[in-house]
Image (cartoon, rainbow, N blue to C red):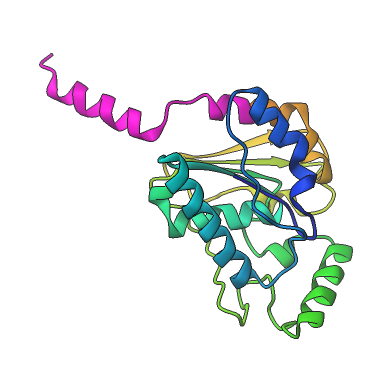
Amino acid sequence: MLIPGFMAGDMTLAPLANFCRWLGHRAIYAGILSNSECPRETMRKLNARLALAHEKFDQPIVVIGQSLGGVYAREIAREQPEMVERVISLGSPLRQPRRAANLAVQAVARSVAALRGRADGCLSESCQCGLMLSDESPAHVPATHVYSRTDGVVHWQSCVDLSGAPGVENVEVTGSHVGMGLNVDVYRVIAERLAMPHRSRLRLADSQGAATPS
């Protein structure tokens, strides 16, 4: 399931969706025309979308999010870990997303929030509509956070998970923030992670190994 960045829509991730299909995977869009809605409402829709995909395919879903989409992807995994196979974030400010962006993006975020009448704290940890972002990684859900020191839109340090949680990795690439969805190095990282065995298979292998005498 692909989640676009702030102010972006599903079609901005069409090249990535086509790449995933080329690899032999199903690509599911988040159903977002412009990722600028109230975060609480966006999370409600994304959770519903995830539940439908999980029911349809009868397996946990890999959630890939660009920028703000990656922040939502991690929150989804925190709320519904049994439905998420893996999280991959692309240039996502995991801590204080609005403050981590450059001044121009902050201004746009304030303007969008003001139009909704929810300017105070929108897209931040003090969001008044109920979304509380956390520095904690999703329990038991592997996460790959891709970042670039030449991002140009968000502070690259904010895209790095410092929790030290098992299953979490930070991968550096070279490229721009907007170009994450077209970056060859990013595609290579995604392809490698999608090729990894599902967690259910790993658990089964572990249990069989534990039951086999040495």
Split into 4 quadrants, where in the image is the C terminus?
A: top left
> Which image quadrant for residue 59?
top left
Query: What residue do we see at 48% from left, 26% from top?
Result: 196
Query: Residue at 45% across / 52% down in the picture?
Result: 138
Task: Using the image, determine if residue 132 lies above or below residue 115.
Answer: above
Instruction: Kindly indicate the quadrant of the structure image that contains residue 33.
Output: bottom right
Task: Report the magenta stretch's main SS.
Answer: helix
Q: Is residue 73 magenta?
A: no
Quarter-of-image position of residue 209: top left
Residue 75 visible in the current orientation: no
**204 magenta-colored:** yes
Q: Is residue 123 left or right of residue 8?
A: left
In the image, what residue occupies the spot 65% across and 28% down? 21
User: Would residue 196 appear left or right of 209 to someone viewing this image?
Assistant: right
Q: Is 61 left, or right, of 127 in this rendering?
A: left
The range drawn in magenta is 190-214
Q: Quick one: 136 or 53, which is closer to the camera?
A: 53
Question: Which residue shows up at 34% across the image and 28% down it?
Answer: 201
